[in-house]
Image (cartoon, coloured by chain):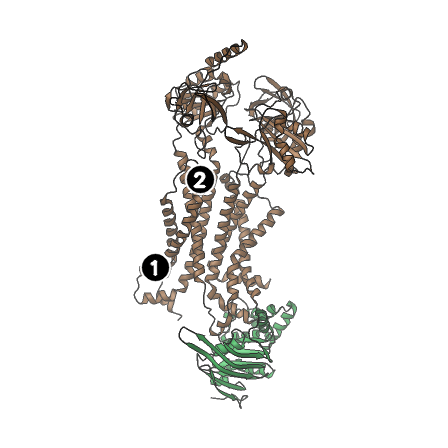
Chain colours: A green, B brown
Amino acid sequence: MIHLTNIDKYYDSKFQRTFVLKAVNLEVKEGEFLSIMRPSGSGKSTLLNIIGLLDEPSTGEYSLYDKSVLNLKEKAKVDYHRNFMGFIFQAYHLIEEMTVYENIETPLIYKGVKSHDRKAMVADLLDRFNMVAKKDLFPTQLSGGQQQLVGIARAIIGKPKLLLADEPTGNLQSVQGEMIMETLQELNKEGMTIIQVTHNEKFAEYGKRIIRLEDGIIRKDLINQIAHVPMIN
Amino acid sequence: MNFQLKTTIRNLRKKPIYSLITFVGFTFGIAAGLLIYLWVFNELNYDKSHQNYERIYRVLTLSKQGNEIVKSPGCYRPVPATLKQDYPQIEYATYLSYSSEDSPLKREEGGEKIEARQVWVNNDFFSIFNGFVFVEGEAFDAIKNPSGIILSEAVAKKIFGKETALGKTIISDKYEKEIYTVTGVVRIPNQSHIDFGYILPEVNRQVASSSNNWGDKAFVHVYIKLRKDAQINDTFLSQISNHISRYSKITDKLLFQPIADIHLHSDYEPGLYDKNIGSYKYVWIFSGLALLIILMAAFNFSVLSLARSSERSTEIGIKKVNGADRFNIISQFMSESLVQTFAATILALIIIWLILPWFNVLSGKELHFTLSLKLIINLLLLTLGTGLLAGAYPSLFLSSLNPSGIFRGGSVTGSRTGFIRLLVAVQFSIAIFFIIATSLFVKQLNYIRTKDLGMNHQNIVVIPTGLWYDNKGFKEELLMNPNILGVSASVKAPVDFPWKSTMSLNHQGVVDSLNATLFWVDEDFAKTYQLEVVKGQFLQMNYSDYWKERETAGKNRKEGKEYTVSVPVVINETAEKQLGFADPIGQRIGDKVIVGVVKDFHFRPLQYPISPVILLNNPETMGTMNVKIASNDRASTLKYIGEIYRKHRDQRAFSYSFFDDLLNEKYQEETRLKNITTAFSFLAIMISILGILGMAVFSIDRRIKEIGIRKINGAKVSEVMILLNRDFVKWVAIAFIIATPVSWYAMNKWLESFAYKTELSWWIFVLAGLLALGIALLTVSWQSWKAATRNPVEALRYE
């Protein structure tokens, strides 16, 4: 599904070129659950930005389903955001002025889904995440774990093929974190391709495959044999 | 509720201070815009109440006076009839022949006499001016009745109160007793340049018997209405132009002026009886001022939206990765400004409804506020325009933000501080411009009020008498009162006497001409107005001398003897200079002999330079009495004058004006401009205070942590305040630099319309700059004081 070939990302300053990503080659197949492990500042947001079509690489090739997605027009990018990928963030990034219900509904509005269908779709997800009672609350009235659940609900309401998660558990206590990871795993089982960035070893293990990114270079790429058995400590 | 609207309102509520600031700004801006719209709309709709007004024209004359070509609304009475007869393109043609002074009217049964302006018209009058609606009677009958009189509604009300006037008998006894029957009452719209007290139709005996010749044009205005399909081409216009010379020896050319242009686009001295003549200049100026205010209000919104862009970039990023395209984001910010402008419009409507009476006093108008479809449409356009203007830049900028920072925790670089500062600086420069303009208007009007006019016009009561050669008894009886210091008859008060005549003169064999104003005054004029006689003496000739001279001249002429009348005249210094006589005393200008020279005095408003004037005595022209009274006990002196007046004028109503009030009337446009600009300056200052307040709240908010750290490290309150205020001082300085040259240019342009003007002193600019600085500092200090005195622990607690 995703092909990254020889991706470089660098910034030129007066006297030197600073590489954020260097010669990154990455293939992600449909239905994969990929964890990208990294120490801070290893270019993970840049990588997510590029995969999420929010930034362009300096050199290299990027294609989705064998179709190059570099230099896309604004309209095409919006199309991918509306129909192909969903985003989850460490800081949840819910819109504070909107209720739980409205937050989840937002992508559907941008997609142009009819009001009647929107209602049904949001209700389904609220039901699935056990949040029906909280639908009229504002994000600040929820716990972190609940907020992240709303974030996930919002990310998947448009039925994307690809879910990009940036430290989804980074701000959460471990119990809540586990709940979120289990939810992601479940989604993956249903066929959703997931790429998550994390520096938490334990949560990385939820992925079927783990790669390590250091100084913009992929150092390790291992298939997680024990993907379905989280380590107990 | 609509999704967009709902989130918009929540967004506005989230930061109530910012929302309030922009909302109040919008309200001020839209209220100002709407007021000016009402005013401009009123100005643009003069004389449009007549059906097919675009086919109605006033016929103007171009005449040669010396070396000048003078355009004038005065025309000749035979013109309408001959035009209509010669040109099939002309459907109707009429004249208005005004009487030179008001006439007394009273009802048959008695009651108070009132004074009203008489005008004669022909049968076509109401076919052209059907905007003068008959509230009683009917045009067709009214115009055909030889003893009929058509009253204006105002006059009818004065005579009959609430009673019907139609069919009642009215008596006028100016020279001889006239008896009329009221055949109609017409309403003259407010927006009309034509005004009259009552109409006598052409079939009236007086009108019919008066000479209908190519005589004096000063009192006659001519109007025509073209046929529907008439072509106004060059041939037609050139034929019209030379029309008069085909019927008379007069060399005047004729030209047409569309009636709708008279109010704003008259480039000639208005006629004696033209009412409410305005100027398109002020329409432009006021529209410009309103636009500036709206611009400032829009900037407030732009500034605050941009200032908060880093705060809102996360939200934009979230929306973008969730599928919002640029249009979604733009429409979100647009709807934020539009929701505010629409709410502001509603509030502005209420405000205007409340302040309209006050604005009417300020602008000297009778503006009404009725929600017509046209007004609603324009109101919507104003609201939309303001909202879009305000939201345009921020929404374009904010929607262009790249959401790629969203993984790093949200914040997006570049909150356009440079642009924001520029906007605030522009706002302040507009405010400074307003302050400068107001100061200069006040200064110029002050200058006008205090300028030495070359005469003493204080405490002079001006009475329109119509006594003509019967002035003597009235004068003598007035002077018996010790509080009456001087009495002089003249043709008019020397407030604004524009009409010039060209006189040819024979100077040592060389024929020359002098274009001068003839001003008729009696022998006491110099004493009453304290004119300074610099050479020779003032007019000494009294009435009996005048008649004796005329008699001799007439007798000699009859006998075939050569006898030139010698009319003694006094000239002013400007005339003396132009004439260039070594010793003017005794020199002749045609039949006039110069007996004296007076120092220049202003017989016209200060827009006009002093021009040559010839003072001469002709008892037949003395329609006005100038009475100088003592400053004490004015009320009883006026009462005394009134009594004497009524005694000499057969109990006619006594009306008078003070010279100074008449003079002030001449500066009405300028006074209004000053008043409106003052009000607008106030608004502009208020809006820029809001702008800078918003800016201060925002930029101090951002530096709260820095302030806390500085304080922990020992910074004093004053040091923190200086730190925070310094930036704003710089902006005001930049605003001052922007405003100064623009104001300098605009104000000089305005001053050019005055022949006598005050200086655009440097201190006005300094004053405006300091005032703006003071206002800015005060506003900012309020916020920076709050920030600087805060306990630093509070600011740092959450870190």
**Residue B583 to residue B187: above or below:** above
Mark 2 vs 1, N-terminal side: 1
Task: Work out which residue is located at the far front of the displayed protein and give it.
Answer: B509
In the image, residue B469 sits, relative to residue A177, either above or below, namely: above
Observer-nearest of B277 and B655: B277
Q: Position of residue B169 (x, y in %)?
A: 64, 22
* Front residue (pair B309, B708): B309
**Residue type, mark 1 in image:** Met
Position of residue B17 measured from the top left corner of the image (x, y, whole percent): 46, 58
What residue lies at 49% left-to-right and 10% top-to-bottom? Answer: B552
Category of crowding for the residue at label 1, using alpha-carbon neighbours closer than 10 angstroms: few (below 14), some (14–19), many (at least 20): many
Residue type at tag 2: Glu
* Viewer-nearest of discs 2 and 1: 2
Q: Relative to residue B31, is residue A191 depicted above or below?
A: below
Q: Secondary structure at mark 1?
A: helix
Left or right: B533 in relation to A148? left
- Which residue: 57% across, 64% down? B327
Name the image quarter holding the C terminus of chain B: bottom left
Secondary structure at badge 2 equals loop
Disc 2/disc 1 C-alpha distance (Å) = 45 Å
**Location of the N terminus of chain B (image quadrant):** bottom right
Q: Nearer the viewer, residue B45 or B333?
A: B45
The chain under label 1 reads B
Identify which residue, B459 or A12, lies in the foreground: A12
Residue identifier under label 1: B721
Q: Position of residue B43 (x, y in %)?
A: 56, 40
Residue B56's x, y, as percent? Answer: 63, 35
**Relative to A4, does residue B748 appear above or below in the rendering?**
above
- Determine which of the numbered discs, if any, sits on residue B798 in the image: none
Label 2 sits on residue: B752
